[in-house]
Structures are given as structure tokens and as C-alpha cells.
Amino acid sequence: MWEVTGKDPGFTDVSDRDLRRLTSAIEDKRLSVGVAESMTGGALGEALVSLPGSGEWLAGGVISYMTRVKRAMLGVSDGPVISESAAIEMAIGAARLLGTEVGISTTGCAGPDTMEGQPVGTTWISVALDGDARARHYRFAGSQTVIRRQAVSAAIRFAADFVGKRYAYDAT
């Protein structure tokens, strides 16, 4: 698990380097991306849509804030939705639903209260690429806004890492 305080600038704002790494890997391999967001409420999609050229590779996203939407639209199984399995099913579900090679998902508890017995700041992020998915667990700190921003930054960094490594992309 990655623990991050609300004051860590490495996770508070999306870095230009991570955005360049992600877009380069996606554009070089002509991939398309879909997102499924819960706790970030569309902020990940907003970060991606603001990039030049994103209209060529960003198919869209699903804001699945309610559990029933996660299950009905994204195929999330019964059980906790703040979990590794739910994050993976969301990423795979986004790619399936939107017809993309890459799916990125965020699920967690940004607060102000705990959810499913999980403390505020608990976050799961998953990236799926051609049906192969990985997830990472984070524990962020700060206000709801700061936690969401940290989750968006971590999702972009994780996606850049996963897609780049899959295609042996050198981001120097």
C-alpha cells in the first residue's frame, strides 16, 4: 500500500511528465482509453480531456458513484466496492463498455465519513490493458478535494507506468 500525506506535492497535482508519458505511450501504440470513476467524480476524465489530442484516444468515461451503477454498467460483483476486485472490474468494465484497449478506474473513500469500514483516504486504482488488469492500494490524507486530486495524479502515474512497461516504452 502507498501512504501519502496531503502535503506531498508528488501526488497532489498531476505532473506534466506523467501526462507526457501516458499520452506518448497511448499515441505511439494507437490505443484508446476509457475511464470509470467513483470517488474522483469525473476529475480523471477532466484531466485527460484537457490534453491536446485527447479527442483521438479518449473514448469517454462512466461516473459510477452509486454501487448499483458499478454493478449494472461495469459488471462489478457483489461485495465491497472499495476493494481491489471492484477496481479491477471497473477498469475492465470501462474498456468493455467503451470499446477501448485501456481502462482506468478509481474507487475509494474521500470522506468526510468512513465507508464500508474503510477509513477516509482509502483508494484503489486499477489499469486494464487488453483485458490484463492491475490494481494499487493507496491511503491518501487531506480534505476531500485534496484526496481526489491525489487519486487523479496517482491514476495517471499508474497508467503511464503500466502502459509504458507493457510496451517497453522509454520515458526519458
Image (tube, rainbow, N blue to C red):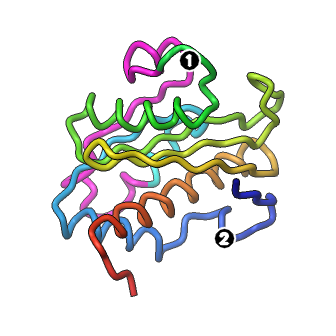
Residue 66 is marked as 1
Q: Is residue 53 left or right of residue 113?
A: left
Residue that label 2 marks? 10
Q: Which residue of the protein is positioned furthest toward the bottom in this rendering?
A: 172
- For the residues labelled 1 and 2, the Cα–Cα distance comes to 30 Å
Q: Secondary structure at mark 1?
A: loop
Q: Is residue 149 left or right of residue 70?
A: right
Q: Nearer the viewer, residue 103 or 79?
A: 79
- In percent of width and height, residue 132 lies at 33, 46
- In percent of width and height, residue 92 lies at 35, 35
- Alpha-carbon neighbours of circle 2 within 10 Å: few (<14), some, or many (≥20)? few
Rendered view: 163 above or below 65: below
Q: Secondary structure at mark 2?
A: helix
Q: Residue at the spot x=70%, y=58% of the render?
A: 2
Residue range of the region highlighted in magenta in the rendering: 48-76
Specify the amino acid type for callout 2.
Answer: Gly
- The image quadrant of residue 34 is top left
Q: Residue at the spot x=25%, y=33% of the render?
A: 98
Specify the amino acid type for callout 1.
Answer: Met
